[in-house]
Amino acid sequence: MKVLLDESVPVQVRQALTDHEVTTVADLGWKGIENGELLAAAERAGFEVLVLADKNLRYQQNLTRNQVTMVELWTNHRPTLERHFAYIALACSKLQPGAYVVVEAP
């Protein structure tokens, strides 16, 4: 899968997704892009998954026509996420296209 990490997600999360092609918003020069515009850009660029830690996105955007699967992490605290990379990888292995998945703390 082609995965995009939002700027709110530590870059180290890419280590949890070694079976996927992972790019960060910073890699693309997309830092600061608003959520709706970011979703559209991600879809145009062919990303299948957007990993984020923004708990408000699902309430701020109309996601009914969205093709990008979104994975909302329970935190953006790097040390906490690093302890749970296997859990994150497992959650990302079960994704359905266009879904919004909330990954809760294990």
Image: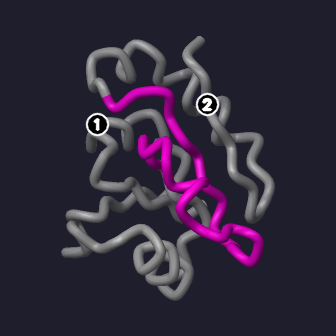
Q: Nearer the viewer, residue 19 or 23?
A: 23
Q: Residues within 10 Å of mark 2 (few under 14, many from 20)?
A: some
Q: Nearer the viewer, mark 2 or mark 1?
A: 2
Q: Is residue 52 left or right of residue 26?
A: right
From the viewer's perspective, is 12 left or right of 14?
Answer: left
Mark 2, residue position? 103
Q: What percent of the width, then of the height, locates residue 54?
A: 43, 46
Vertical position of residue 58 compared to residue 61: above or below: above
Q: Which residues are magenta?
A: 52-76
Q: Choose between 51 and 60: the one closer to the eye.
A: 60
The image shows residue 70 at horizontal and vertical percentages of 60, 54
Residue position marked by numbered label 1 in the rendering: 12
Residue at (19% x, 75% y) in the render:
29
Inspect the magenta stretch and tell me whether residue 65 lies in it. yes
User: Residue pushed farthest bottom?
Assistant: 44
Q: Name the residue located 49 percent from the left edge and 27 percent from the top edge.
A: 74
Q: Is residue 43 magenta?
A: no
- The three-letter code of the residue at mark 2 reads Val
Q: Residue at x 61, y 67 (%)?
A: 48
